[in-house]
Amino acid sequence: LDKDALLIVNEVFQEKDIIAGGGTINILQSQEYTNGKIQLKKVKMLIKLQIMDYLKGFMILKASLSRFNGLSVVSGAFGIFRKSLLQELGGYRVTIGEDMDITLKLQLYAMENKGKRIVYIPNAIAYTECPSTWKDLFSQRIRWHKAYVDCFFVYFRSLFKRFFKGTLPFFFFIDTTLIGVVFTIFSLFYLFYLTIVEYSAHSLFIIAIYFVCISIISITSNLLALHLYKKLGGSLKEKNALSVFTTIIADIFIFRFFIALFMILGTIFYFVNRNKWNAVSRTGEVYHS
């Protein structure tokens, strides 16, 4: 944890209506992160992709969802909960995705108790070691998606009945499920179909339009995430500009397709062996002392 993280959390939790919260998770492999500086030049591409993925996930997605009281997951690496309420609701369920599960349980409580909120606390910062190999990234993302599928089935009825009672059900079904999962998987299969099965000038045009749209979205979101990170007090030196550019290109043409593939496999593996943890190995490297 950053030296000020718990002080910031305690200050936020003075507001009695806040029942849970999550801080910002930064990636340790960027060696200067503990000084508030992102260093991309000295890390391999897989790490760079995850650094940018985390920045977008926290600076944009979690910040936006928190503003609309629609957070569906308080990240397990740095989640804070009001203990009395956690005990009142029966605590954690035995599941592979306990962070999403407990967040949804608390959100259902918040929807029935006006004013109660789960928040994102951007300047409360923790550091984590992200997967350094594709094998470990595969294990991590498979576990994440199995957790999502599990929570989808467990909470579907409860959230659907409350679709018009709060913003969380809308974001969970429309943003996370329809756009984030269904559309992403459909896009992967459709691009594969256009490229392999029905390749033509028309198919090439559709593929080109897809990549233009994805490029605009990716460039915009990455630059916005960096801008928001700098507003929070972080920094990125100009010498990292080329690394940012190559990372965005790799995100567009490589990373997002692997993430879509992991979603597909995570769904399949959930029905094959939903309780397997898919552990990620740790390098044991010393990052900061």
Image (tube, rainbow, N blue to C red):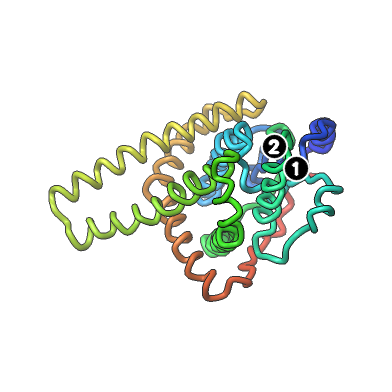
Q: Is residue 149 above or below residue 56?
A: below
Quarter of the rendering containing residue 11:
top right
**Badge 1: few (under 14), some or many (20 or more) residues near its Cα, within 10 Å?**
many
Give me the residue at 67% from left, 56% from top: 101
Give me the residue at 64% from left, 68% from top: 277
What is the three-letter code of the residue carrying label 2?
A: Val
Q: Secondary structure at mark 1?
A: strand
Most foreground residue, 148 or 260:
148
Q: Is residue 180 visible?
A: yes
Give the percent coordinates (x, y) of residue 208.
24, 43
Whole-number angstrom distance, CA of label 2 to CA of label 1: 7 Å
Give the percent coordinates (x, y) of residue 200.
13, 53
**Badge 2: few (under 14), some or many (20 or more) residues near its Cα, within 10 Å?**
many
Instruction: Give the quadrant of the C terminus.
Output: top right
Label drawn at residue 119: 2
Give me the residue at 79% from left, 32% from top: 12
Quarter of the rendering containing residue 209:
top left
Q: Earlier in the sequence, mark 2 or mark 1?
A: 1
Instruction: Give the quadrant of the N terminus.
Output: top right
Q: Which residue is mark 1?
A: 20
Q: Is residue 8 above or below residue 268?
A: above
Query: Label 1 near label 2: C-beta < 8 Å?
Result: yes
What is the three-letter code of the residue carrying label 1?
A: Ala
